[in-house]
Image (cartoon, grey):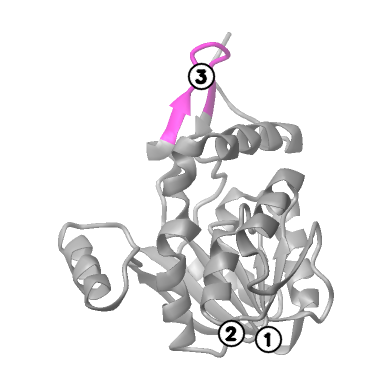
Amino acid sequence: MQQHQLEWTPERIQIFWDQYTSNEAHAGVYFSRLFGRSLIAYVRRRIHIGTPLDYGCGRGDFLSYLADAGCTELYGVEQSPESRDAVLRRIGSRAAIHLSVEPKPQSADTAFLIEVVEHMDDVALDAAFEQVRRALKSGGHLVITTPNDEDLAANSVLCPECLAVFHVMQHVRSWNATSLRKYAESHGFQTLSIEATILSPHAGIVDRLWRMAKRALGATPNLIYIGRKD
């Protein structure tokens, strides 16, 4: 038996994330849960969010923060029925919530793809962008976050039983500012901004101090892309 790259089939992806999300020990490490409020503040300084869509909303951490921020109508796309049920419980009566496996056309002012695009192969990525474009109203915005220029090999492990090599968080591609801008623009989005930014799990002065400390310690920022539907 030889070492080989794991092929991430839809079935394997489902098994991986079902196990990951069912482990409550992982609840505190989700990007949206840690940095969702900081991301909302970042985006609001640049665009009007309006009615949001969270594509790949998981258990609804980011949608919950959007409800806290005053959004009264929310859209979420999520494949897992268990996760969709968790979203409904988390949002409760705080906002009108619409969940589906594909977004409703012309339903959202701003679509968020938070730590999603690094998980997708070419077919899934093209499909996601086409769905998001259809979901956005005319002049709507797209917000993407993803690791910045990630070294995939540095975060890969070997299964000692089958000798498959795979990324510990099921990432299959690495993005930088140039590649992300080019891809988004090839799908009909006008780039408004793209930068590598350190977000934080805090607010106010603590937020600023936390980011300053992380930057001084050499923390790796995430890319944040904001574009407009042409």
Label 2: element kind = loop
Q: Nearer the viewer, residue 64 or 216?
A: 64
Which amino acid type is marked by label 2?
Answer: Ile
* Tag 3 residue: 159
**On the rendered image, what quadrant is the N terminus found in?**
top right
Which amino acid type is marked by label 3?
Answer: Cys
Instruction: Look at the picture and state if 145 lies above or below 165.
Output: below
Instruction: Residue 140: give its label.
Output: 1
Which amino acid type is marked by label 1?
Answer: Gly
Instruction: Residue 83: give its label.
Output: none
Taking the image as shown, residue 216 lies to the left or right of residue 74, namely left
How far apart, in angstroms, are the residues tagged by discs 2 and 1? 9 Å
Taking the image as shown, residue 199 lies to the left or right of residue 12, namely left
- Please state the horizontal and vertical placement of residue 54, each as a whole percent of the image: 64, 67
Q: Nearer the viewer, residue 217 or 66?
A: 66
The stretch drawn in magenta includes residue 62: no
First along the sequence among labels 3 and 1: 1
Label 1: element kind = strand
* Tag 2 residue: 49
Specify whether residue 39 is in view.
yes
Mark 2 vs mark 1: in front = 2
First along the sequence among labels 2 and 3: 2
Residue under the point 42% across and 47% down: 28
Residue under the point 37% across and 38% down: 154
**View extreme (top): residue:** 1
The magenta stretch spans which residues?
156-165
